[in-house]
Amino acid sequence: MLSLELLGPIRARSDDVLLAVPAGKTRTLLALLLLQPGAGVDRERMVGELWGDMTPPSAAANLRTYLSKLRLWLADSTHDDGGQLLVQRRDGWQLAFRDVPVEVDVFAFEKHLERARGAVRAGDPHAASGHLRRAVALHRGAPMQDVPQGRVLAGRAGALTAKWLGAVEDHVAVLLELGQYETARVVLHEFLAGQPYRERAWGQLMVACGNSGDVQGALRAYATARRGLVDGLGVEPSAELTNLYQQILRGEPAVRLAAGATSAPRRIEPLCL
């Protein structure tokens, strides 16, 4: 089994043995081809991803060299004929793992998200929680963080990060629906330590605290969220988050709303990274 992981630093394993992954532009080609299963990547797209608007006169020759290096790496990694794994089609180059079992974490992640959505539609929050938990656990850091990225890979990395952020909050929403408030609090404290501007998550933490009987914890969560937003971004919390705070102050039962109804306030991202 060849395992290829892009949800963090790129990593490859063959039967649980870590493999050295090609560096530089060969690594870029590997990621680009992996993210196009069942479809070819044409020469123009490869050149654009590798060099952007600064295409050198030697681009065609260099591209052939990088493809050759990738083919050799595939052959060594799978103990198979690399020429059968990296093939040229009419629509471009394609990875064709026909007789070689391969697992790519990006597709496992997206499959778990799809199954979680299906479980929610079927009214099975326990199954949804399991799939979301497994999806979130695949994330090891910024996707492809050690891969030289052009426009295509950078866009895909950003989209995968956004999906992961949403998956964490969706998982918490299901945990709250199941009444697993303490588990939700643990997940949220860890999540918010690295994502302090996610207002939906702060609202979820307030609900989890309130449902756990920790009203002071809910109020502290709001105060921490507000301080971070004001000091870090110069904005006040959203009306939804502020209304939830007021409801908790008044002791209203609204705090016991299911997670999906606790509103999804603005997801404000830092202006400067």
Image: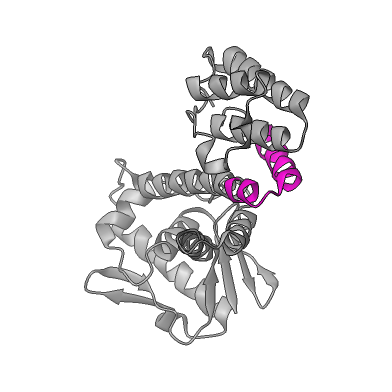
Residue 165 vs residue 151, the one in the foreground: 165
- In this view, 89 is above or below 146: below
Q: Where 185 falls versus 177 (above or below)?
A: above
Residue 36 lies left or right of residue 197; in this view the side is left
- The quarter in which the C terminus is drawn is top right
Which quadrant is home to the N terminus? bottom right
Identity of the residue drawn at 45% across and 60% down = 121
Residue ID at (61%, 36%): 204
In the foreground, 246 or 50: 246
| Residue at (25% x, 56% y) in the render | 44
Quarter-wise, where is residue 142 in the image? top right
Q: Is residue 59 visible?
A: no
Which residues, given as a range, are shown in magenta?
173-193
* Residue 217 covered by magenta stretch: no
* Left/right of residue 90 with respect to residue 142 in the rendered view: left
Which is nearer the eye, 37 or 135?
135
x, y (%) of residue 188?
Answer: 68, 39
- Left or right: where 174 falls relative to 212: left
Q: Main secondary structure of the magenta part?
A: helix
Task: Work out whether residue 132 or residue 109 is closer to the camera in this orientation and state it.
Answer: 132
Residue 143 percent location from the top left of the image: 54, 50
User: Measured along the vertical axis of the image, is residue 113 above or below residue 79?
Assistant: above
Q: List the single residue furthest toward the left.
A: 90
Q: Which residue: 64% across, 50% down? A: 175
Is 178 within the magenta?
yes
Q: How is the image coloured?
A: one colour
Q: In this view, does 89 lie to the left or right of 160?
A: left
